[in-house]
Amino acid sequence: MLTQHRQTWLERIYLPEVLRGLSVTVHHFTRNLSLHIAHAAGLKKNVPAAVTIPYPDVPADLMPRFRGMHRLTRKANGTVACTACLCCETACPCHAIDIVPEAVDDRAIEKRPKSFEIDLSKCSFCGFCVEACPVDAIRMDTGIFDVAMDSRAGLVWGREALMGNEQGEGMEVYPPIDREDLAPRAREVSRS
Amino acid sequence: MTGEFVIAIVKTIVAVSTLMTLAALLTWAERKQSAVMQDRIGANRAAILGFRAIGLFHIIADAIKMMTKEDFVPPFANRFIHSLAPFLAIFPAIVAFAAIPMGDTVTLFGHTVEMRLAPMNIGFLFIFAMASVTVYAIVLGGWSSNNRFAMLGAMRAAGQMISYELALGLAVVGSVMVYGTLDLMEIARAQTGLFAGFLPNWGIIYQPLGFLLLITASIAETKRAPFDIPEAESEIIGCFLEYSGMKFGMFFMAEFVTTVVVAGLVSTLYFGGYQVPYLMADGFHLPFGLFLVTPAALVPWLQFGAFWIKVVFFCWLLLTIRWTLPRFRYDQLMHLGWKILLPLALFNVAATGAWILAAA
Ligand code: SF4
Ligand code: SF4
């Protein structure tokens, strides 16, 4: 049962509580301000004055399981691992994936994506496509999340871009990824 | 005659530019101080030639943004009143400062200059009259926007400001009784000397309750948290919902100018105004017989500096309160205004009267 906290008389006259709140904020203010000043003077660099990560200046700390931009993995011979089974396209709740399969003569493959497009303007980064893929052909471990474009067309990433083979519009941030480079770019989070 | 005219113009330019600069700096201080209080860094991205100047350029960036934004007047809104409201908000805030003394009289080039924009003996009444005008800005702004939410926000805001003006007015009656004048300059002059031999003879000693009441009610007058119901951006949007560009900027600046004016008023009434502790006309009279000679010509400028230091301190205090306390609910606000502040203010008046009678 939820019991309500009955305010004491001191709490109800409000002023002592206001002063208590002010003492907390003023303590933070003086502590952080003196740390900022000390930092400017080159002292106490190991004590942070703010918890802010100055993100574009320093890379963001990502959890290892962070779902970033998708990529298509490769087979050992470097060709795309995707078999165009359309599982991911079916699983996608946002209809963000558009795959056009094509038949190949190779009996070992039979089918591969002729085009594989992810429309990031629809994608909700839920990761269902990764779960759905039976052959581990699509992953979201690039750690890339800062994809901003000045056109909608630039948000549709094609097969080669997802494999890291070409730089699409506004894709300077996207590094080429090969089969060996399966380790996530996301770094271990150091929380002290 | 011309000399007085020139002096009046120079005084006005100096005082208004100081006031506006301080108000502009407060927009920066608001961001940076809240950031420092909340373990953040705060706005620091605006840079000129890669030089960031701890975020100070955000003032310029803000001004450019406000001026270049589209000035949107909603369809079917009353264009004249919609444009009038922001002026009604910022104009009284600026002119209210005229009654606040920034220093004692100085003699400059053979003229006696009073360091206050408008020598008037009804300082209080003038400030409160001007504070009342801002209610019109809010009501007209909300009403002329042709928007129900703006209208509702304006009604609430008007309710708040009218309720707190009562407490505000009554809170200073105590000081008026103690000093027997409505002239802020006289009140500041009366706070010279020492109390009980070692304390500065400041108004807070005579009117501690009045100080608490005034600062509470005047935060409500500046329309800032915990009394920011006029804006209340997270619940019902307040009276300047339909304002954009520099018209919104004027409402925004009015808040900060009012903060400076309130800081000036509080320091004048309760913290000696321009008085420097222990400084007399000939030098510092420290307790225990210590004496420090200061050139007589320097004294008014020390006092001028002391006034602005006090103002900056109270601006800081008001910002700290604004970033510490959450907003009152509307019923709590009314409860506080009518059932707590008003009786306390009346009690303060009665107690001050009794004390004066007993002392006489
Ligand atoms: S992450 Fe989710 S929304 Fe995005 S493509 Fe994969 S399944 Fe679709
Ligand atoms: S589920 Fe995997 S193999 Fe199937 S189409 Fe999608 S990426 Fe290709």
Image (cartoon, rainbow, N blue to C red):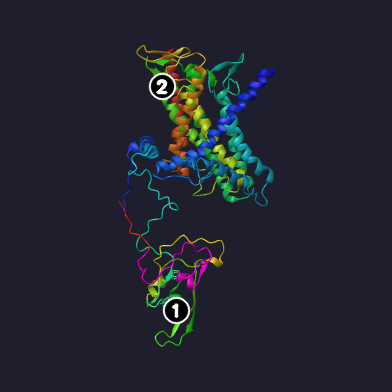
Q: Viewer-proximal residue, B315 or B154?
A: B315
Most frequent secondary structure within the magenta stretch: loop
- For mark 2, does the 10 Å Cα neighbourhood hold few (<14), some (14 to 19), or many (20 or more) residues? some
Residue B205 appears at what percent x and percent y? 41, 21
Q: Quadrant of ligand 1?
A: bottom left
Residue B217 appears at what percent x and percent y? 48, 33
**Location of mark 2 (residue):** B205
Disc 2 C-beta below 8 A from ligand 1: no
| Circles 1 and 2: CB atoms closer than 8 Å | no
> Within the image, what quadrant is residue B81 found in?
top right
Q: In the image, which residues are magenta?
A: A155-184
Residue at x 43%, y 70% (from the top left corner): A71
| Magenta highlight on residue A182 | yes
**Location of mark 1 (residue):** A86
Q: CA distance from mark 1 to mark 2?
A: 80 Å
> Within the image, what quadrant is residue B293 found in?
top left
- For the residue marked with disc 1, what is the amino acid? Leu
